[in-house]
Image (tube, rainbow, N blue to C red):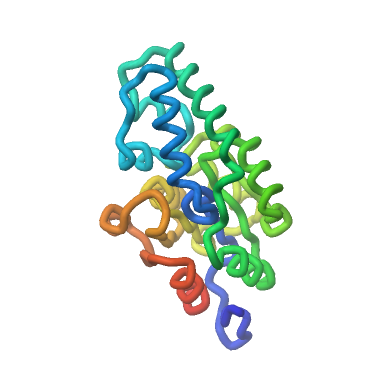
Amino acid sequence: MFGIDDPMQPRRFDLIVFDWDGTIMDSTGLIGECIQLAAQNCGLPIPSTDSAKAIIGLGIQDSITRLFPEIDRGAQTAFALAYRQNFIARDHEAPLYAGIRELLTALAQTQRFLAIATGKSRAGLERALARTELKSTFHFSRCADEGFPKPHPDMLLRLMEFTAVPPEHTLMIGDTTHDLDLARNAGVAAVAVTYGAHPSDLLATQLSLAVVDTVSELNVWLTQNA
């Protein structure tokens, strides 16, 4: 259990926002493979694994533009469709990170708001929440197709609006620089996890309260600091 329920220890964050892919769900490898397969399906240059993972967390349009800046709108639409088909066919393969369910369950008992800010579509997130049975754990969520995608601050601004929690009492947890940029743009604190899409040396270049390597380390940090 978390020590943050100790009445002698003031609570720092009333809204904790999690990214999904690469932070809660171990899906970055699968996403990278589906990006590569979609490129192959569409006759496009197949991006490296690192390049494919680098765009995880962005909205689909920004992802395509970064990977294939030279292709036209028709080719972009075809790639997006191929990626979605590939991922939907396999998204059941992605597990939760070990220990994350227990971490979320404990946090949910601390009478604070838990939320999700993700580059997934609403339909994709709802599938994942239903499959993992985590929907009731979160009070609110925002997806890339509901407003401006990361790193625009819209997702966090909306979540803070929904919960009436100010930026100084909001924490973003994510595995990419896009998550950290989102937090910075919204004026909120962030914690980076290195077990997802972006490597620790890249995450360390961004401003965050902490960079942790495992779910267990994240648990400890939240216990001592949240």
Note whether residue 106 is visible: yes
Question: Residue at horizontal 57%, vertical 32%?
Answer: 145
Q: Is residue 189 above or below residue 20?
A: below
The one nearer the camera, 145 or 64, is 64
- Image coords of residue 77 (percent x, y): 49, 17
Quarter of image, res 142:
top right
- Which residue is painted at 31% across and 23% down in the image? 45
Residue at the far bottom: name it: 8
Q: Residue furthest right?
A: 136
Query: Left or right of 43: which side holds 157?
Result: right
Question: In the image, is residue 75 above or below residue 119?
Answer: above
Specify the quadrant of the image occupied by residue 85.
top right
On the image, the x and y values in percent for residue 41 come to 44, 21
Q: Depth check: give the residue in front, 124 or 154.
A: 124
Query: Would residue 152 be seen by someone viewing this image from the given angle?
Result: no
Quarter of the image with the N terminus in it: bottom right
| Residue at horizontal 46 percent and vertical 34 percent from the top | 34
Q: How many marks?
A: 0
Provide residue 129's location: percent of width, then percent of height.
67, 49
Residue 206's spot in the image, x, y percent? 31, 55
Q: Residue at (43%, 14%) from the top-left corner?
A: 75
